Amino acid sequence: MPKTRDPLRLIIKWLLEGTRGGPMRGRILQVLRERPMNINQLAKTLNINYKTVMHHIEILEEHGLVRKLARGYGAPYTLTATAEDYWELIEEALKNLGLSEG
């Protein structure tokens, strides 16, 4: 796992634990870790509004945790190598939010 003083650690903790939308972003990351999905598939899987998913995906993409696998409408998103590298930290945040066992 990357260094403790790494600024990205603080950003991930804030994105997941420090904001009102953190739990939803955590759920999105969990689902995308299982398999790539597009916005519509995520909305159906998580039983939430399409625009809500889009909002959270944009935030996660802006911070380098998810990326689009192709261009255009309906393209799936997946975790980035950065998200995979920091998965232990993400998992810790998910546990703190009550979204993960262990």
Image (cartoon, rainbow, N blue to C red):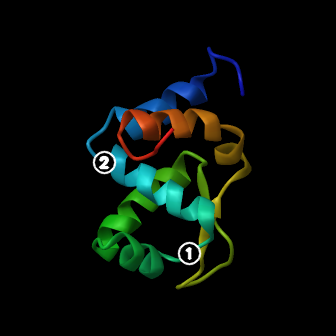
Residue density around tag 2, few if under 14, some if 14–19, many if 20 or more, within 10 Å: some
Give the amino acid at mark 1. Answer: Met
Identity of the residue drawn at 42% across and 56% down: 27
Of marks 2 and 1, which one's residue comes earlier in the chain? 2
| Residue 21, disc | 2
| Residue 8, disc | none
Is 6 left or right of 46, judged from the image as shown? right
Q: What separation in Å lies between label 2 and label 1 (alpha carbons)?
A: 20 Å
Residue density around tag 1, few if under 14, some if 14–19, many if 20 or more, within 10 Å: many
Q: Is residue 67 visible?
A: no
Give the amino acid at mark 2. Answer: Gly
Identity of the residue drawn at 57% across and 27% down: 9
Residue farthest along the front direction in this orientation = 102
Front residue of 59 and 13:
13
- In x, y percent, where is residue 51? 31, 71
For mark 2, give the secondary structure: loop
Is 92 left or right of 1, judged from the image as shown? left
Residue 7 vertical placement versus 85 (above, below): above
* Residue indicated by mark 1: 37
Residue 66 sits in quarter: bottom right
Is 96 left or right of 20, judged from the image as shown? right
- In x, y percent, where is residue 57? 46, 61
For mark 1, give the secondary structure: loop
Identity of the residue drawn at 70% across and 18% down: 3
